[in-house]
Amino acid sequence: MPQPLKKNTETTFQTVSPVDGRVYLERPLNGPADIEQTLELAIEAQKEWQSVPLETKQRILTAALEALLLKSEEIAEELSWQMGRPISQTPLELRGLAQRARVMIDMAPQALADIVPPEKEGFKRYIRRVPLGVVAIVAPWNYPYLTSVNGIFPALLAGNAVILKSSHQTPLCADRYAEAFETAGLLEGVFQFLDLDHENTELLVADPRVDFVNFTGSVKGGHAIQKVISNKFISAGLELGGKDPAYVRADADLDKTLESLVDGAFFNSGQSCCGIERIYVHEGLYDRFVDGVVEKTYLYCLGNPLDPETNLGPMIRNDAADFVREQVAEAVQQGAKSLIDESRFPESKPGTPYLAPQVLVNVNHNMRVMTEENFGPVVGIMKVSSDEEALTLMNDSDYGLTASFWTKDTDKAEELAQNAQAGTVFVNRCDYLDPTLAWTGIKNSGRGCTLSLVGFECLTRPKSFHIRQNL
């Protein structure tokens, strides 16, 4: 696979597989000299790439997507080894990538079209969306393809050069992109990747030749990005996680709601920024709902993610699993009740990333498990007596990524959703990204937008043309 030059060979990083704790991959980190060379190449390549007709860009990116999808089975297996998602589920990420990429390729002509004001005699006037230049994308490990494609494809379609920094937990995603773009005939230097530590990631992002940063990660990481780019006038798209709530009204379809919310809470071992972490249920449906959640939770099979029968894999690291264990134990000490017998998940062992799913009741907002992002397979359920109480609790959070409402009265749900403090509101679905809609968050969930027509805006700048035709 094509890789950038590796000059900093004194320092390496390791990808430790959560499957069995072994080193899955080790390779050198890039250093300042590599960053300099990569930026120089990106600057020159972007000058040529921005002039390539959009139809040609669409054709090249479509070919790259097809090349990527030809390796779906290999990619799915290596992804399971790198981050622990069951092999029965990893192919879904490539299918999601394909859907998003195709939507963005197809909508690019509309998103990048000139804006033409009303005619004015003797003048030609229009606003053109021109590329920013070099876009740095810092991608996470939990959905390494789904998060990175949101930035890579529209950035390239808009005429930018892209430098990708992948998580050390899922570095092979960058290799796969590079291989696919090379196969498709993308101009050398338009897409590159670097393996960087925190210090050199900051060095890249702070460089005056980087014109936009797309970052997905923690709130702490988002603050670090903002601080690093404060010496220049550029923007950053920040997707920083969530504590996403659901409200189940008394008239909800119980079976369909249970199926969706349990999956929304435990898919990917709960390691999803838009996963369901807290559920508020109307008292009229509460007991039956809780019983149903417990019943469905026991259907999960925790184990080796390379086993096709497994549908719940390990968390990414031991310390991530221990953090969730601590949250649950603390909540129980404060009066919460855990409903899942962990002994029925024999693979779940302290000191390992294998963690049984957990359902908590008798919880409240004085407990960290209901206010602090846990990013693991645990969900708290609270009883409420009214729509107003539910909405107040849903909004009582430092995060605002998504919120979902479950009811047969969709008009009422839409009315409630108007006042939900979230970037995306769902009715009768959750934990999903529609590529034709804006993906954005408020409060500590970040700022900026990816996907949809709106997502192209941050990757271009407006340039006005005002031409007097009859002097």
Image (cartoon, grey):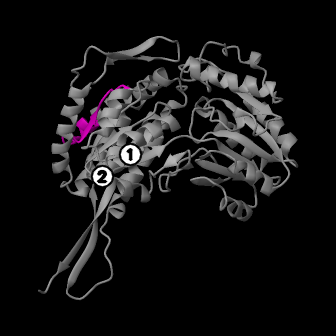
Q: Nearer the viewer, residue 141 or 430?
A: 141
Where are the magenta residues, as a range?
180-197
Residue hosting label 2:
157
Picture quarter with the N terminus: top left
Give the residue type that dot 1 points to: Gly
Point out which mark residue 393 bears.
Answer: none
Q: Nearer the viewer, residue 51 or 78?
A: 51
Point out which mark residue 151 bears.
Answer: 1
Could you tell me which secondary element the residue under label 1 belongs to? helix
Where does residue 414 sit, x and y in percent of width and height?
A: 68, 62
Give the residue type that dot 2 points to: Leu
Where does residue 37 sit, x and y in percent of width and height?
A: 18, 32
Could you tell me which secondary element the residue under label 2 belongs to? helix
Q: Is residue 182 magenta?
A: yes
Can I make out residue 218 in this image?
no
Can I make out residue 248 in this image?
yes
Distance from label 1 to label 2 (Cα)? 10 Å
Image height check: is 193 above or below 150? above
First in sequence: mark 1 or mark 2?
1
- Who's the residue at 54% across and 26% down the image? 85
Quadrant of residue 197 within the rendered picture: top left
Q: Which residue in the rendered view is the most extreme toward the bottom?
A: 121
